[in-house]
Every structure is written in C-alpha cells, then in structure tokens.
Image: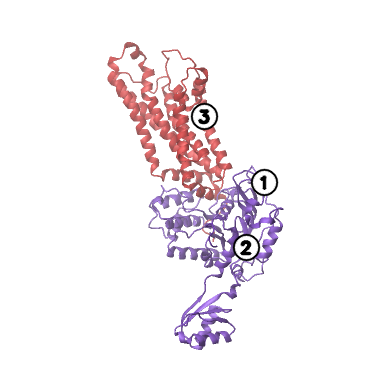
Chain colours: A red, B purple
Amino acid sequence: MNAAYPTGAVDARFRDLLAGEWMKLWSLRSTPWAFGVGAFAALCVNLNATFADYRNHPRYSEGIRELFVPIWAMRDAFTLGGAMVFMLATGAVGALVIVGEYGTGQIRTTFAAVPDRRAVIAAKALVLAAVMLVHGALVAGVSFAATQAVLSGRDAGMSIGHPGAASAVAASALLAPVCALVGFGLGALLRHTATTIVTLTGVLLLLPALVDGRSRWSATVLHALPQGAWRRLTEIGESPVPVEFPWTAAGAWTVYAVWSLASVAVALVAVHRRGV
Amino acid sequence: MDRVIEVDELTKRYGRRSSGRPVIGRPVIGRSAVRLAGPAGPAGPAGPAGPAGPAGSAADRAAVRPAGSAADGAAGPAADRPAAAGRLAVDRLGFTVRPGRVTGFLGPNGAGKSTTLRLILGLDEPTSGSATVDGRRFRELPRGLRHVGALLDAHDVHGGRTAEGHLAALARTNGIPRRRVAEVLGEAGLAEAARRRIGGYSLGMKQRLGIAAALLGDPPVLLFDEPVNGLDPEGVLWARGLFRRLAAEGRTVFVSSHLMSEMEHTADDLVVIGRGRLIAAESLADFAARGTGGGAGRGVTVRTADPAEGPGLAAVLTRAGATVRAPRAAEGPLVVTGMGADRIGVLAFRHGTPLAELSSRGSSLEDAFMELTADSVEYRRKGGAR
C-alpha cells in the first residue's frame, strides 16, 4: 500500500489548491450562468441609457451638449443602475463560493481533505479575485467600447485615451473583484446563504442609497463604501455644480483595497477559528 | 505511532466556550486512556483482558469523577458538573484504534460518535484532551487525503457537481493523480453514474461516493461514520468486504454505527460509548462475552427434520455435555446451551439425524450492547421498555 505514489514534498503544493478551487468553481453549472446573466444585465442597463441619449441628443440644450463628453458619455458607459446590477451579481458569486460549501456541508469534506484551512481560503480568494478581475475587465471594456461606439454616431463618444477614461474603466473592472471579495468575506462570517445575500445587498446597494452625502458624516459613510468609491472614480471632467464634500481618487482606490483585504482577512480568521 | 488513532481525555462541550482558544499545536501530554485489549496480529482477539470487567472499570471511572457524581451516576454528564453550562457531547473519552483491524465505534443515537470523529478530523476543536493520528493532530497536516480517508456524512457534498467533478477537484487539492478518480468510482460501483449530478443521487449512492472519496488518497487510516446507512443489501456486503480488505492490507479502519448487528460481521475490535463516555474498548469476542450469561451461555436452536427424532438427539447432546431445554410444543425446536452450533452439527451428523434448522439464537453482542448502553440511551420513548 501507499506505493502508488509517494507522499511528502509533493503533498502540499499551493498551486494544487488553486487548481482544485478553479475546478470547483467551473464544475458548477450555475457559475457560467451567474457570470453571463450578470454581465448581460449590466450591459443592457448601460446600453439602454446610451440609446436614450442617442435618440434624445439632437434635442439636448447647448449647455448639456457641451458637457456631454466626458461627463454624460461616461455615465452612459457605466450607469449607476448597471453598476448596482453588476455589484450584486459579482458579490453573490463571491458569497456563494464559500456559502455554497457551508450550506451543503461540502466544507467538511473540503477541510477533511485539506486541514490547512487558511490555505484553502487563500486559494479560494485568489481564484475568485483573478476570475473576477478578468470578468470585470471584459464587462467594463465591452460596456465602454459599445456605449461610446453608439454615441459616436452623434459625435458624442469618447476614446479610451480621453483624460480619466482609462482609470474609470479600471475602477469599473475592479468593482467585480472588490464586490466578490466582500461577498466572500461576509459569506465566511455568516455562513448562511440568505443572511449573507441580504447583508451583502445592504452593504453594497442599500446603505449607499440611504446616505445622501449632503452632510459631512453621511458623505464620509458614502465615501467609505465600495459603491461610493466607484462613483468617485467614474466621475470625470469638471462638475458643473460645486461638490460639497470632495475627496480624492487616491482615497477611493484605498477604499477598494481596504474592503478587499479586510474581507479576505475576516474570512481567514473566521474560518480558521470556528468549527465546521 | 504509525497509523494509530489515539484519543486521550477527549472532551467537547457545546454551548459555552470554556477554553477559549483553539488548542492547535499544543503538545500531546500524558495520557491515561483506556486501551483496546488484545494485540494486533495473527494471534487474534484472544489477548489478555485489558480493562477490568464492566463493573470494575465502571467503578474505576466513577472513582475519578468529581465529588457529587457518585450520588447520581445515571443522571447524565450534565449533572456531574453543575457549575459548567452547555451540553457535554464527549466526556474524557480515551481509546486507541490500531492498524490491521476493523474497529467498530458503537453507541446509541446522540452518544457522541460523530462528534468524536469530527474532533479526530480537526473539524471541531476539543474543549480539552486530544485526538491524534500517527501521533499528530490532524489539523497540523497540510493535506489530509493521503493520511486519513474519511466519510463523515454522505450529504457533505455540493449537489451541483457531478461525482467525477467532485472527486477530481478533491484529488487535485491533494496532488493525487486524476486516474484515481475513475479507479475509486469503479471500486464504489459508481462508474455509470460518474457524470450525473450528485444532487440526484440516492442516499446509498451518496454513501458510495463518500466511501470512494475516502479511498481517493489510498490512505493508511480510514474513518467511516455510519457508512452503510441507505446502502442496498449488495452495497452492505460490498462495504463490509471493503472494510475487511482495507484492514487486511494493514490499514486502520474505524467504522461507527448505532447497530451492533452491523459490527458483528465486520469488526475485530469495538469502542462503545454512551453519553460521550467510554463504556468499553476491547475485542469483539471479549465484548460478546459480556452478554447475559456469557457467550457460552447463549442458546442454539436445533430442529430435527423429523420431529420424532428430537428426543434422541437431545440425549446425544446431553451426553456430550450440553444442556438441552425441552421444546415447549411437542414439535418445537430444541434449545441447546453450553455448546456451539458447529459441535452440535457434527454430533447430529454422527448420530445420523438430519437437521432442518441449526442456528445460534439472537445475538449475544446485541444483548451486551443493549445492556451496557441502557443507562446512556439519550433519546428514548418516555415510559417505554428498554
């Protein structure tokens, strides 16, 4: 016995965990659907807004037409509605990567196979973040290209070379891994599907809608949320109205980073400390 | 220690954190575990009697209980330490499971079997005490499948994957070659269903899948929690044969069940617990001898093909030293005690008496089990018979 293959050094390669998590992700039929439906819905919302602007553009006042590029053109590329759909879709996928295991009991089989729980969580988070980065880049890239192609029919589109456009696309692309990791962290903490999705919806969608950003504290709360950071990073050009509580793009990128890293940290600690 | 599962003073209390921190990495310190009697090896189970008889060891254990427990021994562990809150699932449990043998892990529902297995696998942290495999805590291992194969609950799988997808991912995380997936699926009789989603599997098929997963890493130690639940008769036979074979290959095989009859056909050794406490840890033969009247006192039912020949055979058996109880009805069977069925068969043959039936009555193991766990059965119909 045990002659089939040696145990020892080859026993614990981290890339085997990455490969295993990759296989787990794609061996679920729901995964491609979740990615596909999320992307499709977000693109539909953005294109719908773009076509409305395309139709109405001749009737817009001179003032709006002057500001259309970049402010309104960018808002068509990434509408708030499209972003909300995208945040919920990616966050839910991130949550299900871990809650799907707790909810079914699979997590016990997983940890009996790999007792090093933190390595499992790290591998899951890495695979999730990498896949979401590609997904986010695709959706953001396609959304930008498609909406601007439509608007260019009215001579109101912009190129990726426009100042601030590239970073807005990047911010929209990164929304996918950030929200997925937030869902992942919440899932590791709460371990119940319904509870996790409701909390996730609250953090990503409801809370930003409840704070109006008109007082200092509510602006601070909004800025500290992923959605607030995304809004800040996709605002380009000079605002026609004064911004009451301005903040920096660097601050918004920091919010992205903190939510991502904190979510992974929470997942690592919670899963390591608690029984399954 | 090679391939040995060592459980020492293992305690798990749910509902309140008494120790706080997980005890991962803490060194294993002194142990006073009850060990299985009988050396492993060809000599068989007839080893020296390990722990004292039931009465003696129970008294020994009672002696180390905190004051106040003696007053009400049957009131349950919670009454032992009124100061501590929570439910005591495993209470200073100690035993050793050895390689080359199938060890049955028995206890009534809620006795703590599954909790103990989860503690061995590091899925839960013990409140105190330790459980080790090969002298190490399982959670210290970076990967598990090549060390310990386990089936805890057949439902612990994601129903959305196919059996093949599930096992392939598991194998990959442990650096196990992909070909093992088809091998273990074939072994478990799931080759045909390999590409179907697990969600559509019956319980028996899930059990087979769980056993297949346990075999994936060709591990030297295997744990199975109630593995034959839901298996069809063919599956039960297959599982028993598999456990025997794995043990014969020198592996440590630890199989839990709440049914004694299941163990009767499979186990060499038994670990019996009730209400989280150890009741017995010894060879199957020793355990059977605890049954009412002892193993030799059990009856054998003998029915002659021609009822008229009954008295004649009874006389022969009596002369040979057996005790024969007269049949209640004129044509009823003889009940023979003090002699095994094998010897009775030989005597009947020599005497030229054709037999219609020759069977050992009931199960002395079942009786021993019921008797020993009677006080620790947790979920019983109120006012019902034992």
The residue identified by callout 3 is A257
Q: Are marks 1 and 2 in contact (CB under 8 Å)?
A: no
Mark 3 surroundings: few (<14), some (14-19) or many (≥20) residues within 10 A: some
Residue highlighted by disc 1: B83
**Marks 3 and 1, how far apart in space?**
47 Å
Callout 3 secondary element: helix
**Residue farthest to the front, as pictured:** B383
Q: Are marks 3 and 1 in contact (CB under 8 Å)?
A: no
Q: Nearer the viewer, residue A110 or A154?
A: A110
- Mark nearer the viewer, 1 or 2: 1
- At label 1, counting other C-alpha atoms closer than 10 Å, the crowd grade (few under 14, some 14-19, many 20 or more) is few
Return the residue nearer the eye: A52 or A275. A275
Residue A214 image offset from top left, x and y in percent: 47, 17
Q: How many marks?
A: 3
Q: In the displayed structure, would residue B330 be above or below residue B104? A: below
Q: CA distance from mark 2 to mark 3?
A: 55 Å
Residue B281 has which mark?
A: 2
Q: Chain of mark 2?
A: B
Mark 2 residue element: strand
| One can see residue A13 in this view | yes
Chain letter belonging to callout 1: B
Q: Residue at x 30, y 18 (%)?
A: A155
Q: Nearer the viewer, mark 2 or mark 3?
A: 2
In the rendered image, residue B98, in percent from the top left (x then y), is placed at 61, 62
| Tag of residue B242 | none
Residue A260 is left or right of residue B8, and the answer is: left
